[in-house]
Each structure stands twice: as structure tokens, then as C-alpha cells.
Image (cartoon, helix red, strand yellow):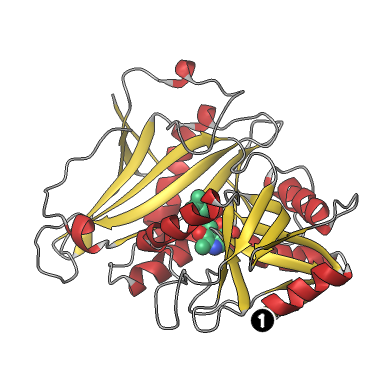
Amino acid sequence: MENIINNIPVTKCEKSKISDVDFNNLAFGSVFSDHMLVCDYKNGAWETPTIVPYQPITLDPSAKIFHYGQSIFEGMKAYKDTNEDVWLFRPMDNCKRLNISAKRLAIPELPEAYFMEGLKALLKLDSNWIPTNSGGSLYIRPFIFASGNGFHASPANAYKFIIATAPSGAYFSGKVKVAIEEKYSRSANGGVGYAKAGGNYAGQFYPTQLAIQKGYNQVIWTDDNTHEYIEEAGAMNIFVRINDTLMTAPTSDRILDGITRKSIIEIAEAEGINVEVKKISVNEVVEAAKNGSLKEMFGSGTAAVVSPIAAFGYKGTDYDLPELENSYASLLKKRITDIQYNRTDDPFGWRVKV
Ligand code: PLP
Ligand code: COI
């Protein structure tokens, strides 16, 4: 069945899979909604996007994505309020960041209208896939990869941009215990750490497996040069509260400019919290843990929202964080999700209606 939404041609699936999904027991990103947006880059230009049933894609074994990892992605969410209206959170920031990543990976930049109009059309079509239970949302995964062929180590001549969506619950279940990384690095100066390149995540898996074997859930990434400064927490930015000051590392070549991070900074400042964007040394955090001034650590990201850290390990010692009743993490999580789910005003102008 063919029709048009937001000028985008749509081929609808014959039968929805939605009745197979248990919306009360959703994991993160493991079931996928009925449709996806697909847009091809060929002969030097992005073609008109189309919406088609969610389905496998066929690629040549020589497609450059397989050999040279030319691939980037974004992570965002759609939220449904109690009136069944659908909202996005700062979606243009994701669109712009996708193109920042594209440039770094020598992928042709995508027209912003294809991203925004394509996404809105897809959400209109699959709006019944957006969970309405507490904490649920439709996780949105826009991505671009090199579909062009050849073993020559150079940028491909063809790419695919796809948006797939997955109704999702919480990213982490239970308490998060992290290991401060002393050997491996996620990124380096002059590298691709600031881009959402697929390979950045592949490179994290092995050190993260080692940490999991030792009883941790995630790795706290430190700077590649000295491993003396705390930079990110797994696939999240990191915040540390010492006494009543909330600190986070400045963005750089090595750190993703997280949309949740920059929103948390603005919300915290509006709440009157003292926020410092500065290099955070491991020593300062360990000292603060020892003398009791370390009150909180938490990660921030689209998937994980605000995830409190219960304990961290460093050089063979584990340090527990206190359980606070009125934590900054819970206040900031409430404030940001109230905006995202349209439960309060949005003084920052971040919410966008679909
Ligand atoms: N850092 C990394 C490495 C990430 O992959 C993510 C996830 O997107 C973040 C931080 C958080 O960014 P955002 O808040 O834009 O989701
Ligand atoms: C997100 O928070 O959206 C991310 O992209 C993290 C992801 C690796 C699950």
C-alpha cells in the first residue's frame, strides 16, 4: 500500500507486528517497529528518502562498511504524553551532530530536511509503537554506512542512511558499578572520539568485557595520554559531585558532545547548582571518596538518561558512593524527563512536537 507523509513516499507493511510485543517487559533496543526510513547516496547525491517495512538489507561482501568501518549513528528518543502527543528532544542537535560525524568519517553530509522530515513522517506512521508506560520511549537510531563496494581503502561512492526505531525500557537495570580505566583508551587527540562512529563502540567492547569479568558494569574512560583524568562513562558523559559542586569534563576531540550533558549543565545552573566544566583528575575523585566529600557520580546520555553510579573501582580498591535522599541525579533526571515527556513547561525551548 503506497501513500505520502511529509512528501515522503511510504510503502506500508502488510501486517503490523505490534500485537507480538509485550510493552510491559521491554528491554533496550531489541524489538523494532513496523517501518524504517531509507535514503541512498549514489552518483554524488542523496536521493529522496522513502519509508518501507522494517526488513533486512542486502549488501555486497565488498561493501566498505565491512572492511573499513565507515559508519556513524545517532541516538534519540520519541516520547508520548498523556494526550498521546508525540515529542522529540533537541532533534536538530542530533541532526547536526550526525553531519559532524559524517564529515570526520568522510561520509557525504545529509540534507537536514531529509533527516527531520523523514523522522517526523516515520514517527507519524509508527506512533502506536511509542510506549506510554513509565520510563518507556521509542528509541530512535538514525545511521549512515558505506554501502559502496571495493577493497580499495578509500571512501565509498555509495551510502545508506536509515532510521530504525525500537520501543524501549531502561538501558541499565540495577545499580551501576564502574571501573576507572588504567590501560585502554576510547579515543585520542586527533582521533574520532567526538564522532559517533561505530568503531568507537567496537573498541570499547573488549576493555568493557574485562571490567565485567571483574564485577563491574562499565568502564570510566580516562585520557589516553596519562589516564589521570576522567572523561566519559561507557557510552555516557560523566558528572561528579564533590560537596555541592557538580563537575563534568570539557568536550574535546576525545569526548562526545552529549545532548543530555549540555542540557543537564543548563538545568543544573537554572536550579542554582554550582557547575564546573573542568578536567577532573582521578586523584581528586579518589581523595574525595576517602574524605567523604564525594557525594555523587552519574552518567548522562539519551539511552541511559541519568544513571547514578553506586561504586567505582581504581587500582584494586572499590569505593562506594553514599545513597543520598535528595541527590542531584534524581532532581536533574526528574527535571529533564519532565521536559521530555511534556509534563512541565519547557523554558529552554528544547521540546519539538511531531
Ligand atoms: N558519550 C558517548 C560516547 C555516547 O555514545 C553517548 C550517547 O549518545 C553520550 C556520551 C551521550 O550523548 P547524548 O546525551 O547526546 O545521548
Ligand atoms: C545513546 O545514548 O543514545 C547512545 O547512543 C548510546 C548507545 C551506544 C546505546
Q: Quadrant of the N terminus?
A: top left
Q: Quadrant of the C terminus?
A: top right
**Considering depth in this image, is 176 or 343 the residue closer to the camera?**
176
**Considering depth in this image, is 185 or 8 the residue closer to the camera?**
185
Cβ of disc 1 within 8 Å of ligand 1? no
Image coords of residue 103 (percent x, y) = 34, 73
Residue in the image at 55% along x and 83% along y: 226
Per the image, the residue denoted by label 1 is 279
**Considering depth in this image, is 139 or 201 the residue closer to the camera?**
201
Picture mark count:
1
Q: Amino acid at mark 1?
A: Lys
Image coords of residue 101 (percent x, y) = 40, 68
Q: Left or right: where does residue 5 sit relative to residue 147?
A: right
Image coords of residue 286 (percent x, y) = 75, 72
Q: Residues within 10 Å of mark 1 (few under 14, many from 20)?
A: some
* Residue 9 in sight from this viewpoint: yes
Residue in the image at 48% along x and 79% along y: 253
Q: Secondary structure at mark 1?
A: loop
Q: Left or right: where does residue 149 sit relative to residue 297?
A: left
Q: Is residue 139 above or below residue 331?
A: above
* Residue 350 in sight from this viewpoint: no
Residue in the image at 54% along x and 33% along y: 27
Q: Left or right: where does residue 6 sit relative to residue 156?
A: right
Picture quadrant of residue 30: top left
Q: Is residue 219 above or below residue 194?
A: above
Residue in the image at 72% along x and 56% along y: 311
Q: Left or right: where does residue 5 sit relative to residue 335?
A: left
**Considering depth in this image, is 297 or 62 the residue closer to the camera?**
297
